[in-house]
Amino acid sequence: MLGLPMAEQNFTSAELYDAWPVLSLTERVEGFELLQRDDADDFFRQLSARDRAELIVALPPGEQRLWLRLLAPDDAADVIQEAPAAQRDHLLSLLDDFTQREVKGLLDYAEDEAGGLMNTRYSRLRVDMTVDEAISYLKRDARAREKTVYYVYVVDAEERLLGVVSFRDLIVAPGDKRVGDVMRTEVISARDDLDQEALSKLFMRHHLLMMPIVDSAGRIKGVVSVNDIVDVVQEEATEDMQKLGAVETLDEPYLQISLARMIKKRAGWLAALFLGEMLTATAMGRFEAEITRAVVLALFVPLIISSGGNSGSQATTLVIRAMALGEVRLRDWWRVIRREVVTGLGLGLILAVLGLVRILLWQWWFDAYGEHYFLVASTVALSLIGVVLWGAVAGSILPFVLRGCGFDPASASAPFVATLVDVTGLVIYFTIAAVVLRGTLL
Amino acid sequence: MLGLPMAEQNFTSAELYDAWPVLSLTERVEGFELLQRDDADDFFRQLSARDRAELIVALPPGEQRLWLRLLAPDDAADVIQEAPAAQRDHLLSLLDDFTQREVKGLLDYAEDEAGGLMNTRYSRLRVDMTVDEAISYLKRDARAREKTVYYVYVVDAEERLLGVVSFRDLIVAPGDKRVGDVMRTEVISARDDLDQEALSKLFMRHHLLMMPIVDSAGRIKGVVSVNDIVDVVQEEATEDMQKLGAVETLDEPYLQISLARMIKKRAGWLAALFLGEMLTATAMGRFEAEITRAVVLALFVPLIISSGGNSGSQATTLVIRAMALGEVRLRDWWRVIRREVVTGLGLGLILAVLGLVRILLWQWWFDAYGEHYFLVASTVALSLIGVVLWGAVAGSILPFVLRGCGFDPASASAPFVATLVDVTGLVIYFTIAAVVLRGTLL
C-alpha cells in the first residue's frame, strides 16, 4: 500500500470486495473473472470458506482446479466442507494425490476441534543438526516457503515433538550450535480432538502465535495458527450473542441466509417462549377477581414484569459472558448469587423509589389512582423490589443450572429469563397486592 | 510440556493461575512470591494488564523495578495505564531512560487506537543490504531477539516504510540477493490513530500476523501483533454483548468489580428503561374503560407484549452482530427491513396459530373466556401478528437509526427494543380489540 490508498492500487478487487454481499452468484462470478490474475489471487484469499466454495462450484471445471489447488490443505478442506454434498467428491478429485490424502484426513475431524483447524504443512528438523545445517535444509524444504510457516518443529524418529525453534531463533543463533541447544523444549501443544473454544483459551493465555497439534501418542499432526483463532473467537462470540438473543445460531451471514431458514432459526425459540409466556395468561386468570375489583392493578402489570425481565437480562448477559471468558466457573455459583442478591436489592430499591415518585406525582397532578393511591404506590414499590431482586437472582443462576446439567449456559437467553421472571413476577405482584390492599381495594 | 500434563511441570504456577480470581490481593502477593523465579516469569506473562498493575503496586519497590522492566514497552504502558493515578509517575521512574521515553510516547495514544496497541521494538533493514548482510546484522541486533519480532521492516533514510521481509523469507532466500529483491512491497499498514475495531477487521480480512503502524507522514512507529488483535476481538464482543443486555460496559471482570460500581453500571439503563416502560401504565390507563368492561383483555397483555419484545430482541441481536462483523452496512437498511417484514409476518402467523389453538382449547376444556371467546381469540391472534411484525421491524431498524445519528448501534439493547415494543404493542392490541369486539364485549 505504502502511502497510496487501497482503492487506487487494488481498484477492482477492493470494489468487488465491498459489493460482494449484495451481488448475486452470477454477478460474483462475472466480477471475479474480470479481475487481473494478481488481484484475483489476493481477492480469493480474503473470501470466507463459504464464499470460496460457492464461487468455485460456479466456475468452469478448469478454473475450479486452479483455485482449489491454490489453497493450503486445511483451507481446501474447509471449502469442500462448505460445498454442496453432491459436489464434494468432484472437488476432492481435482486435487493431486498427496494433497487429496491430506485433505481427506482433515475432513475426518469435526469443524470445531483442533484437528479441523490445523494446517498439515509444517517444517520439521532433527535435534542433532547444527543451526547452519538447519538453515540450508530449510532453504531446500518447499514447506518452509509456505506463507503460514513461522516455526520449525523438532521431532524424533517417531515424529514425537521434542521442541520448537522459530526462524528468528535460527537467524540470531551462532551457526555451529546444535538445534537441540537452540530449541525451546517447553512447547504448549494441544490434542487433535480438543474443542476449538478451549484451544482459543490456550492461545490467549499463553500469547501464542502457533501451536502444534498432536495425537494421543504425542506425534505431531499439524499446526494451528493464531489467525484461525481470531476467527474462532469471533465465531464463538457470534454464537453466544445469537443464543443470548434467543436465536438459533445462524451459521450464515444475515443478508445471505434464506428467509425460510431465517424463520426456522427464530420460530423455535419464539414459539417456546410463547408457550412459556402463556403461563402469564393462566397466572393473570387466577387473579381475575382481584383485577375486576381493582382494575388499577392491571395498569402496572407491564411496568413491573418488564422491570424484572430487564434486571434478569442484565444478570444473565453478565454471567454468560463471564463464563465464556473463563472469569466465572461453575464452582463460583455461590459468590455470584451473593453478589446478585445485593445488586438486585440495590437496583430494586432505586426502581421502587422511581415508581413511588411517579405514582404520587400522577396522583397529585391528575388524581389518577383514587383514594387508596398510597396503598397502590406501596404495592408497586414493594413488587418492584421483589421482582428486580428475583430477576437478578434467576438470571444469574440459570446459566449455572444449565451448565451443571451439561447444557450450553448461553441457552439461558435474555428472553428466556424474561419469560421466567414474567410469570413469577405476576405472582409476586398480585400476592403483595393481596396483602397490602386487603380490606381497601381488595 | 511434551507429554507431561501442565499440572505436573508447572505445579504451583498453574494452581495459582486457577485460584487467582478468588484470592485477595494479599494472598495473590504471597502466592506469587512463593513461585520459583522461572515459574513466576511465565506466570507474570499470563496475567492481564489489570492484574499485573495490581500485583506490581503491591510488591516491594525492588521487585517492582524487576517485573516492570521485564515487560515490552507496550505492555509496560498498559500496566502503568491500569495502575492508580497516584502511582503512575513512580512506576514510570522505575524504567530506564530510553524505555521511559518509549512508554511516555505510547501513553499519549488512546487505549483503543492502533498506536495504543503497538510495540515500539521492531527490527529495521536497509533496502540495499544483501540477505547475508541482513542476517548477520540481525544476529547483532538486540531487538531481533525479542520474542514478538517475526518480521523485519525495510525503511528509507526518513524511516518511511518500503517493504517487509519475514525471518523465513531471509532464511529461504539465496544469501547474495538484495533485501530489496526479497522484500514484499505491498505492505498493509495502518495509521497510528486508527480505531482498534477497524484495525482488527484489517487483520482478519488479510489474515495478517503483524502490521506496521505509521504516522501521518508514512514513517513507521511500531508494530501490532495479531495476539493483541485476539484480545481486541474478545473485548469488543464483550462490550457489544453487555450493551445488548442493557449493561454499561463493565471494563472489569464480573467477580472483581465492586458492588457499588456494578449497581452503577446497571442502574442507569434499568432506570431509563423503567421510565420508558412507565408509558405502558399511561397507555393502559387510556384503555382503563375497555379493561373494566372486558377484564379478559388484561389477561393476555403480558403474552402479547412479551412476544413483540422477543421478536424485537431477535432482530436487534442479529442486526447488531451482523453490523459488528461488517456483514450489514448502513446502506443495507432497506434490504434488512424487507427481510424483517417477511420474517416478522411469518413468525407472527406461527404465534397467532399457537395463540388461537391455546384459547380455543382452554375454552373447550374450562369454558375460560365466556360466550365471545372466538372474538377474543381473533383479537389475540391478530394482535400477535401485528406486534411480532412490529417487533421485528423496530428491532432491526433501531441499530440503523442509532448508527445514522452517530451513536453506537449496540446501544439498541434488546431490553430497549422490548420496551419500545411493549408500549406500541399495547396500543396495537387495544386498538384491534376495539375494532373486533365493538358491540359485543366493548
Image (cartoon, coloured by chain):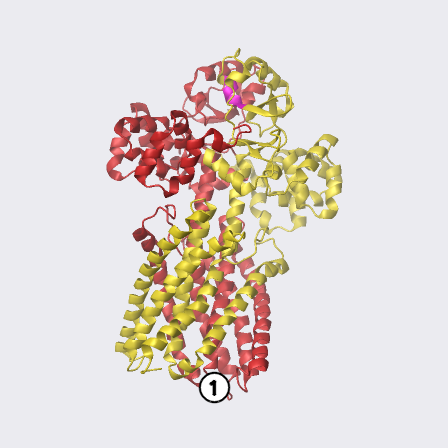
Chain colours: A yellow, B red
Residue at 63%, 37% (x, y): give it.
A40
Give the answer, above or below, for where B371 lies relative to A127: below
- Amino acid of disc 1: Leu
Which span is picked out in magenta?
A: A164-171
Q: Is residue B67 left or right of residue B364?
A: left
Residue nearer the viewer, A377 or B153:
A377
- Magenta segment main secondary structure: helix
Task: Residue B94: name its quadrant.
Answer: top left
Q: Position of residue A232 (x, y in %)?
A: 54, 42
Residue at 46%, 69% (x, y): give it.
A423
Res. A254 visible in picture: yes
Q: Is residue A180 left or right of residue A421?
A: right
Instruction: Report which residue position mark 1 lands on.
Output: B442
- Within 10 Å of disc 1 (Cα), the crowding (few <14, some 14-19, many 20+) is some
**Residue A170: within the magenta?**
yes
Q: Secondary structure at mark 1?
A: loop
Q: Is residue A125 left or right of residue A188?
A: right
Q: Position of residue B309 (x, y in %)?
A: 48, 65
Looking at the rendering, in which quadrant would you find the C terminus of chain A? bottom left
Q: Chain of mark 1?
A: B
Task: Residue B21: name its quadrant.
Answer: top left
